[in-house]
Amino acid sequence: RKEVEQDPGPFNVPEGATVAFNCTYSNSASQSFFWYRQDCRKEPKLLMSVYSSGNEDGRFTAQLNRASQYISLLIRDSKLSDSATYLCVVNLSGGYNKLIFGAGTRLAVHP
Amino acid sequence: NAGVTQTPKFQVLKTGQSMTLQCAQDMNHNSMYWYRQDPGMGLRLIYYSASEGTTDKGEVPNGYNVSRLNKREFSLRLESAAPSQTSVYFCASTQNDPNQPQHFGDGTRLSIL
């Protein structure tokens, strides 16, 4: 079983739609969680951290369910510019900052 | 605001050639990392350095060596390139805090013929 699993998609949605991605992780000792965004042939960039109580940043909402070991990302009112691959990232506990990356979920927003 | 800088951005090598990928960060971060990314796969950690003077293997270290030259610089060396090492390589850095994200360079696209 992969340490971090995501549906690869693609999710094809019209502008204005709401779309949700889920991610599961296998290590219950994982300490922190992130969503990164990666545009085609570019470097990953932090979209948002995921906090235990859930958190929101504009049109983006992230939630964490430790009991079920999954993380979600909700995007409301999708824009064309949201088209990208979204990477679920988990930080394992340990003496250094070790991130495990999911393979990503591809989102394509069309007019 | 340079952040993490990688050189070169593109490189084509022949099988058996050697080369060094350079990475430098100006954010005074303690930890630095080298990843490779292949189609359909997540980023896989090759080597990391938790502090100046220390390096450790990641998930896929075979065929690579690294040097943490100082706090700013972390280089990745391919001694004898193989076609299986064709990939996009990313360098990243962060503070030694599990709640801090990693900051990535632009990547090096490496093709080995």
Image: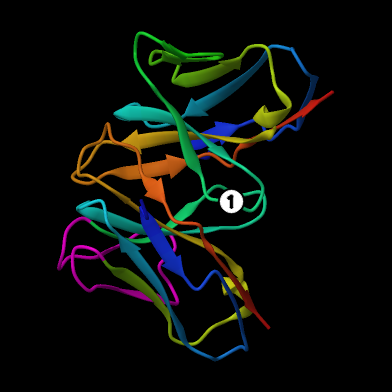
Residues in magenta, as a range: B50-72
* Corner quadrant of residue A8: top right
Q: Is residue A41 above or below residue B96?
A: below
Q: Which residue matches tag 1?
A: A42
Image point (48%, 40%), residue name: A45
Image point (22%, 46%), residue name: A96
* Corner quadrant of residue B48: bottom left
Q: Is residue B95 above or below residue B58?
A: above
**Label 1: chain letter:** A
Q: Is residue A3 visible?
A: no
Q: Secondary structure at mark 1?
A: loop
Q: Is residue A91 above or below residue B20?
A: above
Left or right: residue A20 versus residue A46 is right
Left or right: residue A85 versus residue B49 is right
Q: Position of residue A90 (x, y in %)?
A: 40, 34
Q: Position of residue A6 (x, y in %)?
A: 60, 32
Q: Position of residue A11 (x, y in %)?
A: 75, 27
Q: Magenta stretch containing residue B55, yes or no?
A: yes
